[in-house]
Image (spheres, rainbow, N blue to C red):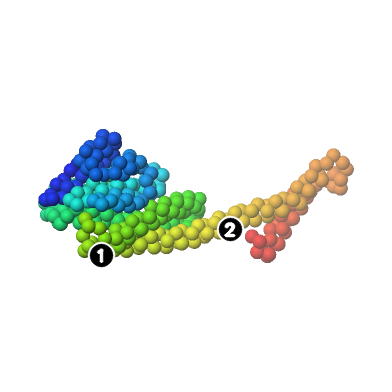
């Protein structure tokens, strides 16, 4: 539990990390107008992005990606926001670095605090969402760098590692698309719908955030196309290498077939030509060697080897 409150002028920013029932009770006491269902949603970590609108405040649920190094995939980190006249409440798990940094900077920098909180809670509300959206692009650039690394390693001998990297990248891209897509509708709603406690001049700024989210969605679509092509190429290479191995094994099997036949025949306990010849073993070995060389020469001329 960590509840921090920052007040500047007529604006109060309450930032809650790792929320629990005690935090919810405190928040209910401070803001009795908050709907019980919204407060109940704070304790749930599986809420879908949404906007609940009331006469005197908005309850907004959004999600942003956070890199999970253990599983090598981006996870959705939820942030719940209450915005009304003169107050902003942010509730999250504490893993969203931009939000943590922004709150710390407002605490320590009077100029920034005046800039973000001196013009009302809606300006601060915009700044919080903008900082979180801006943090998405570096994550996507990292995905792009990982794709380039896969491209460089595609034709190396360690194809198994390349296939594993492609699989993990594809999973990460799918996870990012699931996280980012719903946020576009949320911010577009903030841009288009007029509300008394959100300044009208912020419409353009929310529109800029929508553009950034759309750009992120387009980048992910491009990444998905590239990774699909790389996956197809890796499958083709793997199939080609398997065919090469099978071809070599087939050639060896075909060469060994007549040699096995000859050795089997002369290994039978019956009378055979050259049984009494003291050089029979050497002659058979030379015959087998000649057959092997002849077959290898034939395969070479046919370009099967």
Question: x%, y% of residue 213?
Answer: 34, 60
Residue, far top: 22
| Disc 2 packing (10 Å; few <14; some 14–19; many ≥20) | few
Location of the N terminus (image quadrant): top left
Q: Give the number of the mark in front: 2 or 1.
A: 1
Question: x%, y% of residue 103?
Answer: 20, 48
Badge 2 or badge 1: first in the primary sequence:
1
Q: Nearer the viewer, residue 113 or 158?
A: 113
Circle 2 residue: 240
Q: Which of 126 and 134 is in front in this view?
A: 126
Location of the C terminus (image quadrant): bottom right
Rendered image quadrant of residue 19:
top left
Would residue 227 be found to the left or right of residue 57 on screen? right
Calculate the distance from the C-alpha at mark 2 to the C-alpha at mark 1.
54 Å
Circle 1 residue: 204
Q: Nearer the viewer, residue 166 or 304?
A: 166
């Amino acid at each position: 539990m960590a509840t921090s409150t920052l007040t500047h002028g007529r604006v109060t920013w309450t930032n809650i990390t790792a929320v629990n029932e005690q935090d919810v009770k405190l928040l209910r006491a401070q803001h009795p107008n908050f709907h019980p269902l919204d407060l109940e949603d704070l304790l749930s970590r599986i809420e879908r992005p949404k906007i609940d609108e009331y006469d005197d405040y908005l309850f907004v649920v959004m999600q942003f990606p956070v890199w999970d190094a253990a599983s090598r995939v981006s996870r959705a980190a939820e942030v719940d926001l209450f915005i009304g006249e003169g107050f902003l409440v942010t509730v999250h798990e504490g893993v969203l670095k931009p939000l943590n940094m922004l709150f710390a900077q407002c605490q320590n920098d009077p100029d920034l605090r005046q800039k973000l909180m001196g013009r009302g809670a809606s300006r601060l509300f915009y700044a919080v969402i903008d900082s979180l959206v801006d943090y998405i692009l570096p994550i996507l650039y990292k995905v792009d760098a990982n794709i380039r690394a896969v491209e460089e390693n595609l034709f190396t001998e360690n194809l198994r590692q390349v296939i594993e990297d492609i699989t993990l990248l594809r999973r990460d891209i799918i996870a990012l698309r699931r996280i980012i897509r719903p946020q576009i509708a949320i911010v577009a709603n903030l841009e288009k719908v007029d509300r008394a406690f959100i300044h009208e001049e912020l419409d353009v700024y929310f529109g800029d955030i929508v553009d950034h989210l759309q750009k992120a969605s387009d980048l992910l679509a491009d990444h998905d196309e590239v990774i699909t092509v790389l996956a197809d190429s890796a499958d083709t290479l793997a199939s080609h290498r398997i065919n090469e191995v099978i071809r070599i094994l087939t050639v060896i099997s075909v060469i060994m077939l007549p040699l096995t036949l000859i050795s089997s025949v002369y290994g039978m306990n019956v009378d055979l030509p050259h049984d009494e010849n003291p050089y029979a073993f050497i002659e058979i070995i030379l015959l087998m060697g000649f057959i092997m060389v002849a077959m290898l020469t034939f395969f070479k001329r046919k370009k099967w080897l």
